[in-house]
Image (cartoon, rainbow, N blue to C red):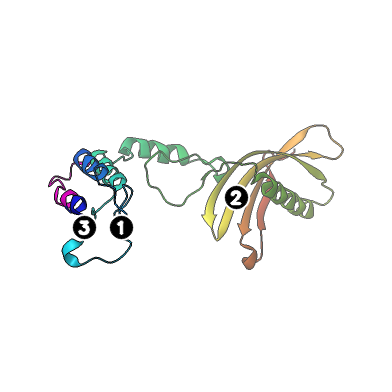
Amino acid sequence: MDDLLKWSKSKPESDDPESLRRWFESIPETPWSSKSSVRFATPLPNSHRVNRPPLSIPSFIQQQQQEEEPKRVCSEQDLADYIERSRELSPYDAISPPPYSNLCGGVAPYLITDSLRPRLIRLCNLALDKFHSDNPGANYVFENIVKITATATSGTTYYITFEARAVAASTCQTFQAHVWDRHPKLGGPVVEECKLKHPLT
């Protein structure tokens, strides 16, 4: 116990992480303490209590790194370029905002993961159903997802560019579908729009 009390009194006055690390690693082994934390198995009188370090060493290091690293921000020029490039783009062709721009909301490219792909294919087929309903006589079969942009709503709103092939044709046509993938409690997905990207003439 005397060793532990001596150790507690030897705490460096400086908050320098390296000094604190050396002090923290020098804790004597006792039945009540370890180098990962300073704990007591049974309550001790106040006169024998050991002051615990205010923060763990990793927290000190993380705090110091946060203080030393400059805050990263998006330049005004990068933001202006993004706005100018986005001005004439449709939601289907939206581009990513510049890093550290802290822009919230808006439509941006969406990563198509293996786990998400089956869900997106179902939405594409749902969009084709609407296209067939709006265009009697049309009969297309889904082939492939080209790209996706999206924005967060009560669920996710997708702008899907995909390919589908007419049953009697050998070449594919490019479609664009605007689908609101609502939470099931709100009624499930709704196809707002499904159209040919380049209408047939």
In percent of the image, x 72 and y 50: which residue is there? 122
From the viewer's perspective, is 73 left or right of 119? left
> Observer-nearest residue: 26 or 108?
26
**Mark before the other along the chain sequence, 3 or 1:** 1
Give the residue number, with chain letter if any, for mark 3.
50
Q: Which mark is residue 75?
A: none
Residue 173's x, y, as percent? Answer: 74, 37
**Range shown magenta:** 6-17
**Mark before the other along the chain sequence, 3 or 2:** 3
Q: Which mark is residue 158?
A: 2
Give the residue number, with chain letter if any, for mark 1.
39
Is 157 included in the stretch rendered in magenta? no
Q: Amino acid at mark 2?
A: Tyr
| Spatial separation of the CA atoms under disc 3 and disc 2 | 58 Å
**Mark before the other along the chain sequence, 2 or 1:** 1
Question: SS class of the residue under badge 1?
Answer: loop
